[in-house]
Image (cartoon, grey):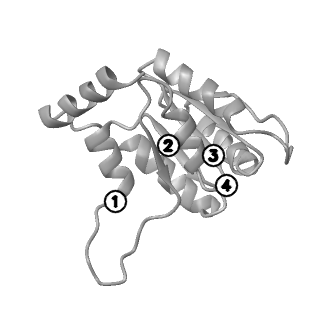
């Protein structure tokens, strides 16, 4: 069982998938703190739920955050406004039509950027795809390579 704390939050578009992922993570032994939405409300605003996730992740560097919305884009933008947060959007692995091999987005985001918030596009992902993405993101560690540490340090120094 993993005792990592996962802060989670979603607006109306991500509410249903958030509830599923919350249970999924709790069953795996994670300490999940839900920052809302607590019910479906099509008029809610994602910053109300995303900022508390991001702020808590920034304060507790051993924790991680998962935020959900329709595309995940606005949620990542909001989360990335909090200094110390490195949110990455995932709404499906890119499959090039020209036959190129591309790295796994989530793996690269964790290994190179030490992404501490995962922003999921609930309108793009099935329940199973979301669970697989969360597992991969949580199981992938930061490489700790000097070049990546240097870049993250610059983000923290230059950010607000």
Work out how far the residue at label 2 is from the one at label 4, CA to CA, in angstroms: 14 Å
- Mark 1 or mark 2, earlier in chain: 1
- Residue 109 position (above or below residue 159): below
Residue beneath disc 2: 118
Q: Nearer the viewer, residue 32 or 74?
A: 74
Q: Is residue 28 visible?
A: no
Work out how far the residue at label 3 is from the one at label 1, CA to CA, in angstroms: 20 Å
Label drawn at residue 134? none
- The residue shown at (37%, 83%) is 97
Q: In what element is the residue under mark 2?
A: strand
Q: In what element is the residue under mark 4?
A: loop
- Is there CB contact under 8 Å for labels 4 and 1? no
Q: In what element is the residue under mark 3?
A: strand
Mark 2, Cα crowd under 10 Å, few <14 / some 14-19 / many 20+, is many
Of tags 4 and 1, the one toward the viewer is 4
In percent of width and height, residue 27 lies at 61, 39
Residue beneath disc 1: 104
Q: Residue furthest bottom?
A: 98
Q: In what element is the residue under mark 1?
A: loop
Residue beneath disc 4: 70
Q: Nearer the viewer, residue 33 or 42?
A: 42
Residue beneath disc 3: 68
- Is there CB contact under 8 Å for labels 2 and 3? no
- Mark 2 or mark 4, earlier in chain: 4
- The residue shown at (48%, 15%) is 59
- Horizontal relation, residue 71 to residue 143: left or right: right
């Amino acid at each position: 069982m993993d005792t990592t704390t996962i802060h989670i939050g979603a607006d109306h578009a991500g509410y249903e998938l958030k509830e599923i992922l919350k249970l999924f993570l709790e069953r795996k032994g994670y300490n999940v703190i839900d920052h809302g939405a607590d019910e479906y409300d099509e008029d809610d605003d994602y910053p109300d739920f995303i900022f508390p996730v991001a702020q808590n992740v920034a304060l507790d560097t051993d924790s991680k955050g998962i935020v959900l919305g329709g595309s995940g884009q606005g949620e990542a933008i909001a989360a990335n406004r909090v200094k110390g947060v490195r949110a990455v959007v995932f709404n499906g692995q890119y499959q090039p039509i020209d036959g190129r091999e591309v790295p796994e987005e989530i793996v690269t985001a964790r290994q190179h950027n030490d992404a501490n918030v995962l922003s999921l596009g609930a309108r793009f992902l099935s329940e199973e795809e979301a669970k697989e993405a969360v597992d991969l993101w949580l199981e992938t560690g930061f490489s700790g390579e000097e070049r990546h540490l240097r870049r993250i340090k610059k983000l923290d120094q230059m950010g607000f």
